[in-house]
Every structure is written in structure tokens, then in C-alpha cells.
Image (cartoon, rainbow, N blue to C red):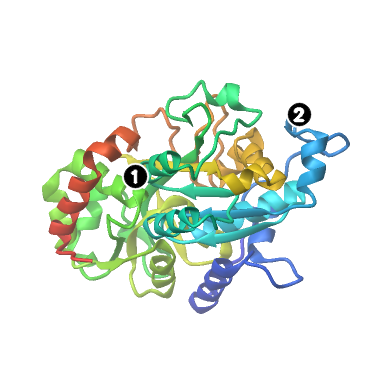
Amino acid sequence: MRRKLTLGLATTALLVLTTACGGGGSGESPASDAARNEVLPMPAKIDTSNGLVIDGERIADKQLFEAAKKDKVVLYSGSGKESEDLTIARFKAETGIDIELTRMPTNKLSERVLSEHGANQLGAGVVRVTDPLVAEEFAKRGVYVNYQPPSIGELAKGDNVVFNDGQYLTAYYSAYAFGYNSAAVQGKDVPKKWADLLDPKWKGKLGVVHAGAGGTVTALAAFQLDAFGEDYVKALGAQQPRIFDTTSVQLEALARGEITVATLGFNSTYGAEVAGAPVKLVVPEDGISGSFNLMGLTPAGEKSPAAKLFINWTMSKAGQKFAAAQGFVPARPGLEPTPTGEYQLPPADSEQFHLFTPEDAKERSASTVQTWNQAFHFTG
């Protein structure tokens, strides 16, 4: 049963989850408990007698698995900290292999990765980003190297899942919608569609992450412009929202009641809800935005069995199913729908899922951010 907490305790739980899996303690973290018991039941069968096989799908042969058990994954990620904590805990529960995570927004992560790579000091074996243009730049610079997981045949059946014959992959799609503080907003006040965010009662109480912070929020801005027009975005900006640099800080403010409604990354917010924070999500019938969550193996990862196994697991049925259960939309085609708790996100091929493609990112990212900045009078 999901824990029910007061506002103060829920905020504490959110902060604990935000720092979970970073190393240290000997006990179970909230993320570990959630990954095993709350987000999705563990696989029915994990066979390690001859490599790693999860529910009938081979993730690694014996040689790779035995080597990976003596190694650890070093992961750099621009994805949400809350969701990465859950992913790390689930990966460790299913494989027994540890992960060291460094997380920061994609734009800042890109600077660090390129700097370390240029100095031949990039220690990450896997790098995950939320901006197709950043992933493409990593590929050009040699940050990503070719690697094909066992599921490559299935992955290749989807559009924009495998890039450059496996130099990098779409791990899954990030979904962006909106939500509210469930301790402060109840009953008929709960917003149900995007237009509801323009209600005057939310003036000064709305929280957003600025459109230039990463690919997910750029995708959200593009969706809003396409679906509802520039006047909608201007009206949203006129609500005098509090503008954040990262989702993590935004979620803490929402849990504390400093803001009461917010546009939100689905996976990060669901991770906070699982931890006990008083936040609820909405899947509006008028659509949600989708963006790419991409990953690749680095030169250091070529030498890391654990890094290779992490990519194999992420693109397996088990990894994709867990991604769906925590609020992502799977990239691997042909999978049965998996709910995210009480929520059901639309599949990648649904008209309700508005995906910001790599082509969109190339052609529209700069103009989208500029339009958003003007509408919100945001100067960075």
C-alpha cells in the first residue's frame, strides 16, 4: 500500500528520494523499496544459471554477466533524478550490479561530457540525454561508440529508435503533462485540460521549468504552440508563474505548497508521488508532449561489461516495461501497454502523444525557446 504522509513528511520523503542511490548507507533506500514493491512487481523469473535471462529474454551471456558482476555502471544522465533513482534501484534488484550516477540538466551535462571527452577523461560508460541535438553532437565527437544490444532486431523495427547502426539509441520517450499539489487542490478545482491552467485562480501559483533547460521542456513548449497557439503560451506567461531551472527543485516547491499547479515531467513526478509527496498528475485528453530520452555507450563503456549490460537491460522487455511503469513511453515497438500506477499514458503511435522529433529539434528548437522566453519575459 502506498504510504500516506503529511505535507511536511512528504516533502522529507521527496528529499530522501532525490538523494537516494547516491551511495553510502547500508539499508534499503526508499527508491529501492519502490522499485521492488510499488512501481511494478519484480519479474516472475530471473535466471542466472547461464548468463542473465529475465522472463525468457536473454540480457547477457555468461561471459558478459560474470564480468559485469565484478564491474559497476558509471552513468551520466540528463534525465530526472527521481526516475533515475528508481531505474538504478530496479536494475540493481534484477541484476545485482551497482550504478554510480551523475545527474544534471542536459545542457549542463553536455558541457561537462564534451570537456571531459576532449581531455580524454570521460569516465562515464553510458551517457543519457534528453536532447536529440546533443546526442547527435556526441555521436559526431566520438562520445558515443557503436554498440548493438541483443534486442537490436526488434528495436530497428521502430522509427528513430536506432541511430547510426547503433551508435546511440532511444531509451524511451519522456512525457510532459501537468499536475497539482493534492493537499492544496481538490475536487472541482483539479485542472483537467490545458486551458484550465489559464484560470485566474492559478495566477502566481503556477510552476514551470523554462523551455531552454532541456529537450523535454522545449518539446512541451513546441506542443503548446502547435496545439493551442502562441496566444495560449502568452496567456500562460501572464499567469506570473514561478520559473525553475530543474524539475527536482520544481517538485520540491510543489510538495511544499509554494506552488499548487505545475507543468511536469511525468516520470519525475510519479517518482515523487511514489515516495509519498502530495502530488498528483493529470493525463489531459487534449494531449501530452513527448520527447526523446537517448543513450549511448562511450569509449570507457566499451571496456565496461556493466555498462554494456545496462544498455542491454534498458532495451529489454523487462527494462522497457519498468520504464513504462514509472512514467515513460517505451521506445521498443510491439510491447503490451503498462500502466503507471493509476495513470495510463498513450502509446508512442497515438494521436494524443505529440512527439518532438530529432528533425523538429534541428529546425525548431531555437525559435521555440525564443518564442517561449518572450511570452514569459524570461531572460535566463
Give the quarter of the figure containing the N terminus: bottom right
> Residue 368 vs residue 111: left or right?
left
Q: Secondary structure at mark 2?
A: loop
Classify 367 as above or below 188: above
Residue 95 locus on image (x, y percent)? 75, 47
Q: Quadrant of the C terminus?
A: bottom left
Amino acid type, label 2: Gly
Q: Give percent across and percent down for residue 51.
A: 82, 36
Disc 2 and disc 1: Cα gap in Å? 36 Å
- Does the image show residue 45? no
Which tag, 2 or 1, sits closer to the chain's start?
Answer: 2
Residue lying furthest bottom: 8
Instruction: Estimate the x, y position of residue 228 in percent, counting from the top left.
Output: 18, 42
Q: Nearer the viewer, mark 2 or mark 1?
A: 2
Apparent side of residue 271 relative to residue 308 in the rendered image (left or right): left
User: 196 or 99, which is in the foreground?
Assistant: 99
Residue labelled with disc 1: 284
Residue 312 visible at all: yes
Q: Identify which residue is drawn at 33% across, 58% down.
A: 213
Q: Which residue is mark 2?
A: 56
